[in-house]
Amino acid sequence: MARWVLHVDLDQFIAAVEVLRRPELRGCPVIVGGDGDPTKRGVVSTASYEARKYGVHSGLPLRTAARRCPDAVFLPVDREAYEAASSAVMATLREFDAVVEILGWDEAFLAVDGDDPEAAAREIQRRVRASTNLDCSVGIGQNKLQAKLATGFGKPAGVFRLSGETWFEVLGDLSTDALWGIGAKTAKRLAKLGIDTVMQLAAADPHALAAQLGPTTGPWLVRLARGQDHSAVVGTPYVARSRGREITYQHDLDDWEQVRSEVMRLARLVADDVAAEQRPTARVVVKVRYTPFNTHTHGHSLATPTTEVTAIEQGALAALDQFTGRRPVRLLGVRAEFPAAG
């Protein structure tokens, strides 16, 4: 029997949970973010497919979302409800005879043995819907990379297989940022080298790319474009790699002494979070979103992993000191990163 990787991704997860609680909203454009008031500053956490037709997406300012989709229903974020729904879904996935690797609230990989992965995928969809009333899409691949990318072609609520045999037929002519792991910045750097498509990247000389993009990154990008991924599906419990707090201010912070005070306050909250988990922090990252919407991050590695409040606070301030711009600020965030496992 062949071994397949299945990627299960809950469709419009947060919006779907909200619609389950408010069935009258089914078919309506629903936008979840902040405290649900689109006149306030905040960003979209998720949008229903009906809202996405208007160009609303995660990370978009709520005010912009309201302009693009004035008839949308705006709802506040309810983290506890989403965690409960996610737990129910993941419990259902663990009932299968498969290794399950949870990636977060709304997605997981399953390693499945058998000659009919589509049947396994449809059974997953059936049982998730029966236990939670939520829909999911399932991507099928010979490795995690292929399965993850396949899911996008199966949405919504569909099943799609992507293998080595169909890889270039499906992806070859797409831009490089269609690949999982390549963002806009990397795609732009590749474009400057004359590499615009997945096929062109797959045909590139790994040694030449190593000279341009680094000895690790260059060859890795070529393997990515060829659909190669040797990482295993692991069934160890999902553990967050970081803990963070952030806040969007309804009025710009013009005084950087106030910015400094707010970073210290957020750092103390984060320190309380990591102390409660007894997971030492190795690095502290500060996020600053300037007015109107330019976001930058800087990090500072701690001398020794710790849960000590003062060390985390000082790490946050050291990261903040790396920001040279002193423009008005609309959002601040502090994130504590845990040491890599193993």
Image: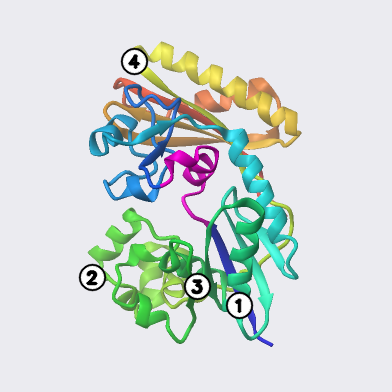
Under mark 3, the amino acid is Gln
Name the main secondary structure of what is drawn in magenta: helix
Label 2 belongs to which residue? 194
Check disc 4 and give the amino acid type: His
Q: Is residue 107 left or right of residue 227?
A: right
Q: CA distance from mark 1 to mark 4?
A: 53 Å
Label located before the other in sequence (1 or 4): 1
Q: Residue at x 72, y 28 (%)?
A: 275
CB-based contact (under 8 Å), mark 1 and mark 4: no
Rendering coords of residue 313 (x, y %): 59, 22
- The residue beneath circle 4 is 251
For residue 272, side relative to residue 336 (left or right): right
Q: Quadrant of the N terminus?
A: bottom right
Q: Secondary structure at mark 3?
A: helix
Badge 3 crowding class, 10 Å Cα cut-off, few under 14, some 14 to 19, many 20 or more, is many
Question: Helix, strand, or loop for circle 1?
Answer: helix
Magenta residues? 10-26
Q: Nearer the viewer, residue 33 or 185?
A: 33
Which residue is disc 1 drawn over?
119
Q: Is residue 56 above or below residue 38?
A: below
Q: Earlier in the sequence, mark 4 or mark 2?
A: 2
The numbered disc on residue 146 is 3
Q: Nearer the viewer, mark 2 or mark 1?
A: 1
The one nearer the camera, 249 or 88, is 88
Q: Earlier in the sequence, mark 1 or mark 3?
A: 1
Q: Position of residue 199 (x, y in %)?
A: 33, 78
Gap between marks 2 and 1 measured at Cα:
42 Å
